[in-house]
Amino acid sequence: MKIGFAECEITPPVGVHLGGYFSVRPATDVLDNLYARGAVIESKGKKIALVSCDLIGIGPNYVEKIKNIIFENTGIDKDAILIHATHTHTGPKAVDLANPEDKVISGDTDLEYLNYMTRKVASTVIMALEHMKEAVYGTGFGYEDRVAFIRRFKMKDGSVMTNPGVGNPNIVEPVGEIDPRIDLVDFKYTDGSGNLLFVSYSLHADMVGGTKISGDHPAAVRRKVELGIPGCKVMYFTGAQGDINHIDVKEKGNTPKGYPYMLKVANILGGEVIKEYENITYHDECDLDSVIKRVTVPLRHFKDEDYDWAMGIIKSFKDGTFKQNTMNKTADIARALRIRNAYNGKDTMDLDVTVLRIGKTGIVGFPGEPFIGYKKRIVAESPSDNTLVLCLTNGSSGYLPVAEAYAEGGYEASNSPFTPELEGLLVNAALEGLQELFKK
């Protein structure tokens, strides 16, 4: 087999609005540059391409532009291309606003930057083809349970709250469990010049905050590992993280904010990767395959009174009377925007589930932010020896909650445009894709 790697810097100019919050955040400085990193893998006459970008998410229209550029310049089939965003909250918006007037709520997009970004992301794959080397493929994993936490909690009043606050006395217990596994997929060049290592972990990339551009912990993990393994290049893929973040709500002082704490988390994760890299097992064969499973999912419908409530919330936000001082208030504005956008809208939406086979490894990419329950169900039933489940792959369609979350409530489910049928439809599509690729 052969593999090629290339990267392009995609740092926007200062002043571009950052994504991830319901506030306007023009970038004021750069803590670390943002990158797109691309790989092309070739084996037995087939090629697949993967790109990981330091972005909060990429709209499906921009994904399509990137894929078109790649296909036109390389001939790689568009169904064999995986475009992933690590979900940094200190990077630019790469999704068009549902309504242009919402720029006063969450900031504007920079179309000039987005045109530049799409070309640079595609360039990583085009250049990677020029750097193809013979390689052997291996798999491994690490374990880290000290830096990731379920962020949804059952409260004493029976409700479920997202991010209820550190030390909140009304917390009863978390709703669910994290996945501490760090998935590793390695490609070691047979000429001895180094390796390309895929790293995947399920944790929100939202530690830095503020208005300074940063790739957050995915970028810092890359830097840590590359310092520790000579000749190594890392591509980081954020896993199923819709209900997981870095905040330990039980112990005050355990979760400082900002860049220094992010570096601490990255050092912990990167250290585990470096340790377990020595235990990677290499395989004789590396079959490649890919499939896109398009799923038609139902959308919520809302009543007139829901719409009236939503428009009242949006109006109060725009006139400055809305106080976004709790996570419940953030959920209110998120839900209001969803209701406004969905009211009298479509009944269904098509979502693409991307499934790849790399040897004994299955990769499932969802076009949104799946809860960790998606990964657990897929891994339990997958025919592959190890299965990576990624967020924000080939699109960005919001949170993808598990079915029970809709009745429980909380931030993610309250602003989801989907219905409880979503989980079953997407998980079944992923498993069908894996069965198709691994039973050939």
Image (cartoon, rainbow, N blue to C red):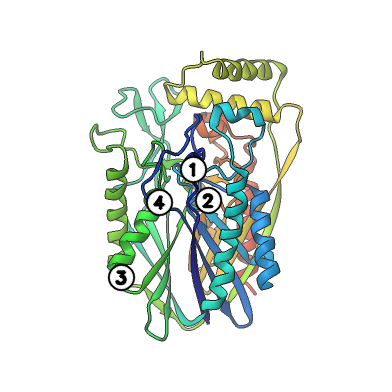
The residue that label 2 is drawn on is: 391
The residue that label 3 is drawn on is: 229
In three-dimensional space, the C-alpha distance between marks 1 and 4, rounded to whole angstroms, equals: 12 Å
- The mark that comes first in sequence, 4 or 3, is 4
The residue that label 1 is drawn on is: 242
Q: Position of residue 110 (x, y in %)?
A: 59, 42
**Do callouts 1 and 2 mark residues in contact (Cβ within 8 Å)?**
yes
Q: Residue furthest top?
A: 321
In three-dimensional space, the C-alpha distance between marks 1 and 3, rounded to whole angstroms, equals: 31 Å
Query: Of the residues shown, which amino acid type is indicated by label 3?
Result: Ile
The residue that label 4 is drawn on is: 179
Q: Residue furthest bottom?
A: 191
- The mark that comes first in sequence, 1 or 2, is 1
Q: Quadrant of the C terminus?
A: bottom right
In three-dimensional space, the C-alpha distance between marks 1 and 2, rounded to whole angstroms, equals: 8 Å
In three-dimensional space, the C-alpha distance between marks 3 and 2, rounded to whole angstroms, equals: 27 Å
Query: Of the residues shown, which amino acid type is indicated by label 4?
Result: Asp
